[in-house]
Amino acid sequence: MKDFLLSISSTFDYHAYMKLTKVQAIFWSLADILMILVFLWIVDLLLRKRGGKISAWRYLLLLLSALMTPMLLLAGSSRSFFLMEAAIFAVQYLLLIYTLIRDGKSVLDVLLAYRGQDRADHLSQNE
């Protein structure tokens, strides 16, 4: 096993490492975009139940990060790659954090109201 792993590592140079890292970062970014999009849809749905709605600029920021993601392939050095990746992920995760801080209480209130309503409905059915 040791010889097998050493033979693989002998053909794995900096350029191969950077190509694989770029591909991996793109897949991670796409997974993050999908996760955040679903999260924003859920928050938007719950806010609409309460009469509000999520700001469109959050979707625009997510779109901006999606448009920035293919630029990772253009990074010439590991430093430029790291800076681009950090910028993309910062936009995505700051968007998540902002949404949790801004709308977390409203979403929780909606969920608790539905939980209380479900519990009341369940009790009235058992009587």
Image (spheres, helix red, strand yellow):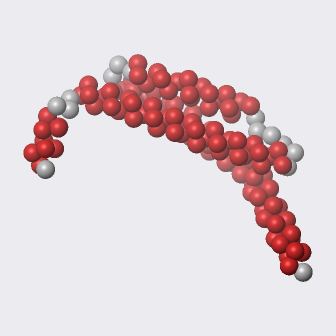
The image quarter in which residue 20 lies: top left
The image quarter in which residue 93 lies: top right
Q: Position of residue 25 (x, y in %)?
A: 42, 34
Q: Position of residue 39 (x, y in %)?
A: 65, 45
The image quarter in which residue 16 lies: top left
Q: Is residue 117 above or below residue 39?
A: below
Q: Position of residue 17 (x, y in %)?
A: 28, 31
Residue 102 visible in this rendered orientation of the protein: no
Is 5 displayed left or right of 88 in the figure?
A: left
Residue at the image position 75 percent from the left and 52 percent from the top: 107
Q: Position of residue 51 (x, y in %)?
A: 87, 45
Q: Residue 102 or 6: which is nearer the viewer?
A: 6
Q: Single out the residue that lies furthest toward the bottom.
A: 127
Is 121 displayed left or right of 58 in the figure?
A: right
Is 17 displayed left or right of 26 in the figure?
A: left
Q: Is residue 108 above or below residue 29?
A: below
**Total numbered labels placed on residues in the image:** 0
Residue at the image position 49 percent from the left and 35 percent from the top: 29
